[in-house]
Amino acid sequence: MDDREELIREFLIESHENLDHLDGDLVELEKDPQNRERLDSIFRTIHTIKGTCGFLGFSKLEAVSHTGENLLSRMRDLKVTLDAEITTALLAMVDAIRKMLASIEATGNEGDDDYSAVMADITRLNQGGAKAATAAPAATPGAAAPPAPSAADDSADERRPAVSDSSLRVDVGLLEKLMNLVGELVLARNQILQFTATQTDSGFIGATGRLNLVTSELQEGVMKTRMQPIGNIWSKFPRIVRDVATVCGKSVRIEMDGKETELDKTIIEAIKDPLTHIVRNSVDHGIEAPAVRAARGKTPEGCIHLRAFHEGGQINIEISDDGAGLDIAKVRSKAVQRGLITGDQAAAMSDTEISRLIFLPGFSTADAITNVSGRGVGMDVVKTNIEKIGGQVDIQSVLGEGTTLKIKIPLTLAIIPALMVAAGGDRYAIPQVSLLELVRLEGDQARDGIEWIQDAPFYRLRGNLLPLVYLSRELGVDRVGEDDIVNIVVLTADDRQFGLVVEEIHDTEEIVVKPLGQQIKGLSAFAGATIMGDGKVALILDVLGIAQRARVVQDVCDRTRSMSAQSRTEDAADAHALLLFKVAGAERMAMPLDLVARLEEFPQSSIERSGAQDVVQYRNEIMPLISLSQFFSDTAAPAADPRQVVVFAEAGRSVGLVVDRILDIVQEHVVVQRKSTRPGVIGSAVIQQRVTDLLDVHAVMRAADPAFFETAGAA
């Protein structure tokens, strides 16, 4: 169904509802012509019909309703007094409108009937003309008599057009009550299904299966009544785009795909403001001025494209513009200038990570505060509000070509699929939208598979370090379970993965989300509650809240580097943050953590050769690799697979230092007790009560890859 057909359908439904009330209102107004409120209601109804049919191109219907509107307007101004003749004429107009509506529904046009007599009679009455000689109080005067009922009319309109029969307006409060009752029915269904698992009576099991099927269908039907097309909130965006573009002196059009995509009413309300801000931001920050666009070979008119579609049980929304794109260098500079990150952190971050800084509180690239932007409040609120409803937001931008914001949100918040887990003897629900996979470690794997770096646990999942969070520890409950079994629920939060260690993993269930009580509403670890099949309450975990509490939504290197930067500020003379690693088989070495951009692992298959140099494709560049074992020893141990690499970055370029094994990140007071004449080594110090050589990173670079500093200097 195209947009015009949908508009006509809505117009027919609303008009028929209004006409039903109009018949009664006119009769009641005849009894009490001084009832101003009823007269105003009649006028508004005819005015609405006239305005909408004019917009849709129904000129005959517009003309008839416009004539009646003129008469009603003079009645409102007390220039014409309602009497039986005027009431009859207006009722004839209502019949004419109803007949045209029936024709529009059946054929798509207003029909061939002539309503000029109806219009002429109303015009005469509007001008105070004399009563026609043939008129009678109970009939429409003269030739203006109501059209004779046709076969389609079927005798005071007993047959209603099908389109009005297909729709019914329901009070929102009643709908919410019905939804709550369905939620309670789902809970009761779950209890019965749990009880049925222990039964053997075939009749009882069959009845339970039927109950399960009917409940599921009822749940789906009621959920659909809460669904609304996203076009309901998109409809105001053309006006917003026009207003902001006018203020900014720009020419911008807006295009929309997927306006019919439906999602829950509560979700619609939650994303309305974030989407509005994104659209305003795209016009203000994204689209260039017409002269600038023309100079860059673009059309003077910019374009903002909105797209919505279903995928994987979620709603995907994309807001794209063909503007200037993000200036990564400017974003990096502004973030450092506003104190959101340090200079060292900025230098080590990739372009993608830099672009995500726009979601930090207080960030803005605007040079001055205007009534449109510049206060540093907006994109962080967008991200927070979307994540509150279990959604995710990400940004992709190409300088000079444009920016796309991608949003993923659940279809509904009322009834969701969830994984049930246990910790401390209690059950908890994890929304399935955040779940990636499940990992179970047993025996030696459980005891030896967990690695610790600066008191933080990690598990190597397919070669990648996965930070772990123990649910019992975060909730402050005693752990219950076997030490030689580790259950890891791999989750995603803020576009980062982490493993949640739980004591037991149960089945997935559809749960009814209940709001938290006032006493625990402020706890960031929980998003709601649900009632289980046995009648007990289980809390729903807030995955993002737990990740933030455990500080795993940042890279381990970023986190420890931030920690070390803070400690140096507080007491620079006492301790230094160091990365410990092994090279040449057994030699312990250390380097300042400030020089570490990232810790990576590369499988042997990804290592390539460029001339005499090992290289790897890394973040859209070819990164050279320097083996420290080969640098310091001719008899280096065989390379491990995957290779552990310390990434060093300077002036926009990166080099990977290959080590045998990363040991730890420590903070210690370093005293160089023994100077070294060996190339690449500053000296030796006692770290963790063991003699450790201190790596001279820049010396190694100069010796192994002189071109690096030449290129970096040129940059």
Image (cartoon, rainbow, N blue to C red):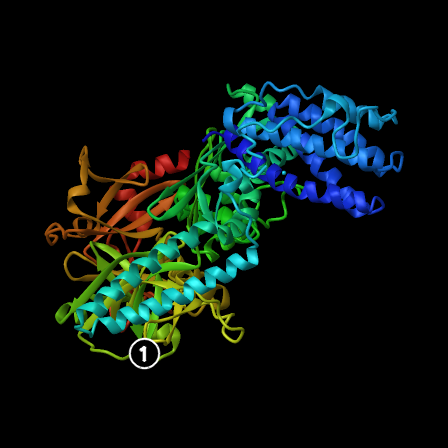
* Residue found 63% across the figure and 44% down from its top: 374
**Is 475 rendered above or below residue 19?**
below
**Is 7 rendered above or below residue 535?**
above
Judging by the rendered image, the residue that carries numbered circle 1 is 424
- 352 left or right, relative to 277: left
Q: Number of numbered discs present?
A: 1
* Residue found 74% across the figure and 31% down from its top: 139
Element under disc 1 = loop
Amino acid type of disc 1?
Gly
Foreground of the two, 629 or 486: 486
Image quadrant occupied by the N terminus: top left
Foreground of the two, 179 or 576: 179
> Residue 83, image x and y in percent?
83, 37
Q: Where is residue 171, by image quadrant? A: bottom right
**Is 459 rendered above or below residue 321?**
below
- 142 left or right, relative to 308: right
Q: Can residue 201 be seen in this view?
A: yes
> Residue 269, image x and y in percent?
54, 51
> Residue 19, image x and y in percent?
65, 39
Image quadrant occupied by the C terminus: top left
**Is 562 rendered above or below residue 46?**
below
- 132 left or right, relative to 493: right
* Residue found 75% across the figure and 26% down from its top: 67
Q: Is residue 287 visible?
A: no
Foreground of the two, 202 or 144: 144
Q: How crowded is mark 1: few (under 14 residues within 10 Å), some or many (20 or more)?
A: some
> Residue 632, image x and y in percent?
19, 52
Foreground of the two, 602 or 294: 294
